[in-house]
Image: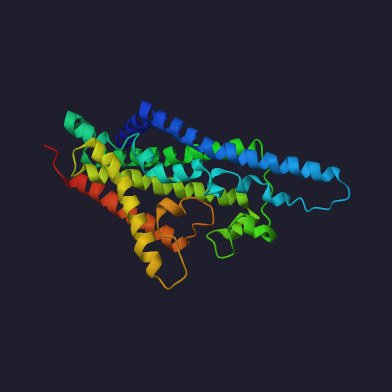
Amino acid sequence: MLWNAIKLECKKAILNKLFLAVILIGCTITMFSLIPCLRAFYRDMNFLEKMSQDTSVLRNPMMPLNSLFNHWIGSEAITPGSTDYFFLFPLLIAIPYGWSYCAEQRSGYIKNMVIRSGRWQYHLSKYIALFLSGGLAMVIPLLFNFLTVAMFVPAVTPDPHYITGYGIISSSFLSELFYTKPFLYVFLYLAIDFIYCGLIACLCFSFATVIKNRAVVVLLPFFVLLGFNYVCSSFIYTSSNVVYTELSPMNFLRPVGAYDTNGFVVSVGIAILFTITFSTTVVRGGQSEIY
C-alpha cells in the first residue's frame, strides 16, 4: 500500500505541466551561462591558433584553463545565467508540487487518500514526492548545461598550477577531488544540490500544515533562504573574526570556489532541514486527525 501511494504521488509530482515548465525555464536560464562561456572558449582557441602561426612568439597555451570544469554554469559566478539560476532556484523547485498539500486539503482529496492508504503512508509518500520533484527540478537544468558544454569544451583535468583560474584553493570544499577526479567532484556537488533542494521543496509541505494559501506556501522557502542569506552577509560574516565560511545555501550550492563552505556546514544544514520538514509533516501528520 505504501509503495502504491509513493508511485502515485511521484507520478503526480513529476508528470505534470508545472514540472515540465520549470525544467524548460531552468534550462533556458542556463543557456545565458552556456552561450557566454562557449564564446569565451572559442575566442581563446582562435587567439591561440593565430599565435601559433607566428613562430617567433612562444606562448603557454594554458590548456587546463580551457576545460569543461571551469566553463559550465556551476564553475562560474559572473554570467547572467549563473547569477539568476542560483538566485531563483528556491522558487523554481517549489513551483512543480509545493502547492499540492494545500490544494488537496481544500478539495478534500486528502481524506480519500488517508482512508485508502492511512495517514502515515499518505504524508510519507507526499514528502518523498516533494523531495524528488525539488531535487530533480534543480539538478536537471544543471546537468543539461554540463552535458551541453561537454559537447564543445574538452574535459581537461584541472591543474593546480593555474589555481587562480579556478578559484578553488587547497582549503576549498572537496578541492582535492576537483584537481584529481573532477567528474566525481561535479557528481558530488550535484548530489548535494539534489538533497538540499529536495529538502527545501519539502519546506512547502511544512508551511502548508499551518498556511492554506498556495501562493504563500510556494513563495515562503524563497524568502526564508533570501532572508537567511541577508543575515549572513550583513551580520555574521562582517562581525566574524574567524576564517570566512559560507553558510547560505543560496551561495554554497554552486560549486565555484568563490563561495567556499565545508563538510560540517553542509551536513548540519541537511540535518536541520530534514529534522524540521520530516517532523512537521510525516511525524506530525501521521498522528493528526484530518476530519
Where residue 285 appears, as percent x and y from the top left, is: 21, 44
- Residue visible at 63% across and 53% down in the picture: 181
Q: From the viewer's perspective, is 164 left or right of 74?
A: right
Q: From the viewer's perspective, is 125 left or right of 60?
A: left
Asked which quadrant contains residue 207, the reply is top left
Where residue 252 appears, as percent x and y from the top left, is: 46, 54
Q: Quadrant of the N terminus?
A: top left
- Residue visible at 25% across and 46% down in the picture: 206
Where residue 71 appears, as percent x and y from the top left, is: 61, 45
Q: From the viewer's perspective, is 132 left or right of 276?
A: right
- Residue visible at 53% across and 48% down in the picture: 78
Residue 82 visible in rendering = yes
Viewer-closest of 162 and 265: 162
Viewer-closest of 104 and 246: 246
Asked which quadrant contains residue 15, the reply is top left
Q: From the viewer's perspective, is 237 left or right of 117?
A: right
